[in-house]
Amino acid sequence: MTTSTPLRTPPKKTWSWRSQAFRGLVYQALALLAIGMVVWYLAHNTLLNMRERGIQSGFDFLFQTAGFDIGESLIAFESNEHYWRAFLVGLLNTLRVAVLGIILTTLIGTLVGVGRFSRNALVRGLCQAYVEFFRNVPILLQLLMWYLLFTELLPEAAEAWQLGSVYLSKGGVNFPIPLWAAGHAWAGFGLLAGGLLAWLYRRWAIAHFEATGEPRSLFWVPLALVIVMGVLGWLLGGAPLALDEPRRGEFSIENGGALTPEFIAVLLGLTVYTAAFVAEVVRAGIGSVAAGQSEAAAALGLSRRQEMRLVMLPQALRVIIPPLTNQYLNLTKNSSLAVAIGYPDVVSIANTAINQTGRAVECIAIVMLIYLSTSLLTSVLMNIYNSRAAIKER
């Protein structure tokens, strides 16, 4: 007859100095207290010095009239509006560059990185030349280069180059935009529905591939679903076709939509510069995959394209995503250099506010908070994607 040994109960946590957990909590509390006291001392000393010199402080200026215009904004802004709205315009302009830049950087960097493994020597050489040139020229010089290309080489608005209804001049790119109608809202709902269907299809296609080994299109079919649903929503909304066409004015191109040379220069400069680093990240990630995986894909009869898409890139993601996150953060923070060519981002708005109000500490704190928040949000989203893309151990 066997006797079962009683299960040991875990030791109870004791609030004694002999407890390692208790000592750890005390040390952490003391460290936080010390950090808090240092921050309080620095803030108190700064405010005291400012008060002695007659310098005003506080964030009440955000509700004062700004008194300046902003040349480019996604939302309406007038000079008689408050500073907080001016900072909002700068934030939206910064996000506009950062989000579009991240999307374009990912596409270009991935294509160039994959091109480094091409069997065509010319393609490999061009990809390597792209990487070596753009990553070794400082980003500020590249921004100035793109800006000068637009402002010095392109003609004036009166002699703008025209391709159909699109104009290209020193004032930027002017193009037709739709006149708002209810059908555009229906088209937006259709695009959302198409995105949902595309997401469901991709989940099914991946599960089908894992179960049967038969690959399904993960790009063209989802893209077709989004386009078809968007067009269907547009048709259901009455298919509005009215456009706001640009036309030559006496001194500029009037009406229609426009992309200013400052915005285009910032977007191109940040994209081509960061894409060179992303290409190296992708190349290193693919190179980290064992050579046997490529040989196994060839033995299964997969084409070179299928091998890269179905075998190499999925396994390389676990190596690619962490440094790719750093490049996204660098792109967002490097957008602050846009002030050098006059793009009205949040740093430019802050500089104007400092010159008018003298609230340097407050304005710099707002800029720091904005970049800190956007960077942390990017990190959180990429960490979530990284956990989903990581190879699951059995």
Image (cartoon, grey):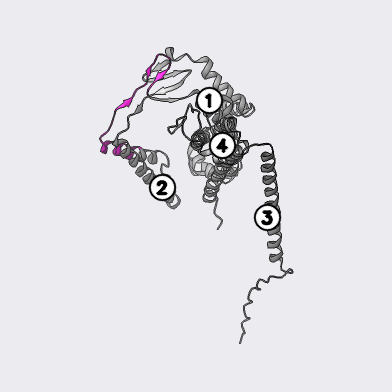
Q: x, y (%) of residue 301?
A: 48, 42
On the question of residue 222 being in view, the answer is: yes
Q: Which mark lies nearer to you, 2 or 3?
A: 3
Residue linked to disc 1: 265
Residue linked to disc 4: 332
Q: Which one is in front, 267 or 78? A: 78
Name the residue at 41% across, 47% down.
205
Q: Quadrant of the C terminus?
A: bottom right
Q: What is the residue that sits farthest to the bottom in this orientation?
A: 1
Q: Is residue 18 above or below residue 233?
A: below
Q: Which type of secondary structure does the marked residue at label 3 adopt?
A: helix
Q: CA distance from mark 2 to mark 3?
A: 50 Å
Whichever of callouts 2 and 1 sits on the residue coming sooner in the sequence is: 2
Q: CA distance from mark 2 to mark 1?
A: 40 Å
Q: For the residue marked with disc 2, what is the amino acid? A: Ala
Q: x, y (%) of residue 285?
A: 59, 41
Q: For the residue marked with disc 4, what is the amino acid? A: Thr
Q: For the residue marked with disc 1, what is the amino acid? A: Ala
Q: Which type of secondary structure does the marked residue at label 4 adopt?
A: helix
Segment colored magenta: 227-255
Q: Is residue 117 above or below residue 27?
A: above
Check residue 244 for magenta coloring: yes
Q: CA distance from mark 2 to mark 4?
A: 34 Å
Residue linked to disc 3: 32
User: Tag on residue 205?
Assistant: 2
Whichever of callouts 4 and 3 sits on the residue coming sooner in the sequence is: 3
